[in-house]
Amino acid sequence: MAPPAAVGGGGLVLLPPPSSVRGKRTQLLQFAVQSNSAAGLRGQPRGGLSRALSSDRRILKLVSPCVARISRSSLSLQCGGGAERSGVEKSNAVVATHENCGVELSEESQSRGDALLPRFPAMVESSERNGRGEEEEVEEDKSLGREGIRSNGASVAAGGEPNWQRGSRDGRVLGSSGNGEVMRDGAAAVAASGNGQAVGESSKGGMRWNMLLSTEALEDAHLNRASSVTDAHVLRRKGRLKEQDGLIEFIISMHSTHSPFQVMEKLERWVREHLEDPMRSTLSRLIPTLGRFHTPLPLVRAFHEYDEFASLSRRRFVPPNFAEIRHVLNIAQVHAIAEKLSLITFDADGTIYADGHHIQGDNKMIGHIIKLMQQGVHVAIVTAAGYPGNAAKFEDRLAGLLEAFKDLELPPTITQLFHVMGGECNYLLKVNEHYKLEFVRDELWMSPDMLEWAESDIRELLDDAERALRSGSARLRVPIEIVRKPRAVGAVPREPTIYEVLEELALTVQVQLMGSRLPFCAFNGGNDVFVDVGNKSVGLRALMKFLNKKPCETLHVGDRFTVSGNDMATRSQCSILWVANPEETAFFTRLLLTDIREDAILPGLMHNKLSS
């Protein structure tokens, strides 16, 4: 074999390609960089390929032209003989076949959610990128184009290879029908009937939403808990989630002396003990800031389900991280509450849609929310956004959902199960007969102590909060704009700043307002810091009393449960699901709906069995 690449001037000289590139990524990279010189690796000392591999991204920039040349000439990757990949999808993705692990991509591509894991069924979906840059869209390589992955129309399953196809328009796959036909997510919504026949988009809006609600193939056929490539991407660690929680950190620390199974077994027992006696339980002594549980948690069962693809129990050197423990807790909470769920509340920004966006017609949560309501579950969106006396602004944020209500002509028996709570706890809205939002009178739903809040106390709280925001921003040297509302005041930086600065500002305000006569919420919104009169705990307690719901049958889904988040207060009122983004919200809601359907079917099956 030729010696490793040397550093020097000149271009990359390709040797004749080997007969197959179905080897390890290292071998392909080694072939690519073998040359008289390696331009682009200047500045690195001689030291062989192992030293060069540490600059993976820079090597990939050199490798991509040669892969392009190879793919355009004669090479093709055969998947069981039934499908052919005729182009390279991304300029910086080197596709190779590991001898034991199936298809893998470069590390950079995997970070964007492009890994094709052979143990998962055939369901690949590109991640949705939001405008805040949490995951930047990968630019299409102009020299290669985007040919996608072609198929002969048959399932590619020979030799244990994954059965996968990708649409020619935008590279997204929703799933395949029972007879091998593919449902693509293009300009038209596509559903599948019971025999797998594709159904095109109807010109009527009602048909569009009916397809969204009735098509189980799009979400349930491929859903066996967290078992698809899409689910693995949704549940992978995001890295931008603010990870602060005493319970989760304690669970992680236990893995230094216990196996993952032993950890979950102990925790499940301790949670039951804590439910019976929160003041003198083992968990209360180990984690003084723990708070309350409202249901038992089947953590062992949840661990086994998540372990199917996360391989927590098989890892010898890498313990579970924060996000993985959070996922196990979420799965356990879904199982625990599905049977008796009566009210579910969702945060808005970052939970059911991206920060700064609204519910559009293609939002996955539309179908899930309607299905929950059809199961008799009350659904409420609890958000910090507050527009006193202006229901139209709330409607703008939920336009896609309200349009679906109207197109489906949902009866009042269904729409009356939906509410919106704004300003943390200050405004409650319902859906009227015209599928518009209207305010519910305060005296009908507010608690007596909320009705006694004096305007003078509200004004004093907001004045103190504004002074704290101004002084804190001056100390941190952050120029801000003050936004003042009837029951909220906020600081919006004039220039981009980092999260930690906003965190400091939010915590500073919390400390300075501790003596306030009214409850409040000072939180880091990610792009700003706001202080609201009241908090979600106050609002959720009033909503539960208004709808006559108990804590053990109520669930709140949010993305900010840290000390500077506005979802933290809900923990005292009900069970929670902690999500990182709207994709995770959709994933766990699907699990919840699956459990609800199973719980509804099981009594009938048991009755038939006993009768027979």
Image (cartoon, rainbow, N blue to C red):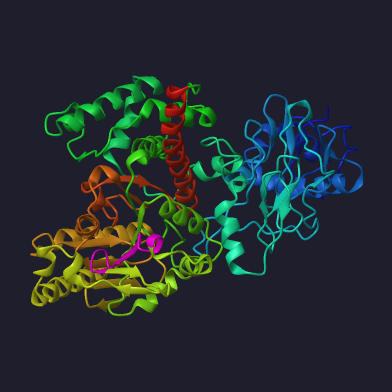
Q: Compared to 246, does 202 lie above or below?
A: below
Q: Quadrant of residue 425?
A: bottom left
Determine if residue 319 is in view: no
Q: Compared to 31, does 540 lie above or below?
A: below
Segment colored magenta = 413-427
In x, y percent, where is residue 391?
35, 77
Q: Compared to 541, does 48 lie above or below?
A: above
| Left-right relation of 253 to 331 | left
| Left-right relation of 179 to 513 | right
Determine if residue 281 is in view: yes
In x, y percent, where is residue 466?
20, 73
Which is more toward the observer, 20 or 237? Answer: 237
Which is more toward the observer, 457 or 47? Answer: 457
In x, y percent, where is residue 114?
64, 45
Query: On the rendered image, what quadrant is the N terminus found in?
Result: top right
For the point 55% across and 35% down, which residue is it? 224
| Left-right relation of 380 to 520 | right
Labels in figure, total: 0
Q: Quadrant of residue 274?
A: top left
Magenta residue check for 552: no
Which is more toward the observer, 448 or 332? Answer: 448
In x, y percent, where is residue 322?
39, 38
Magenta residue check for 425: yes
Q: Compared to 515, does 482 lie above or below?
A: below
| Left-right relation of 611 to 24 | left
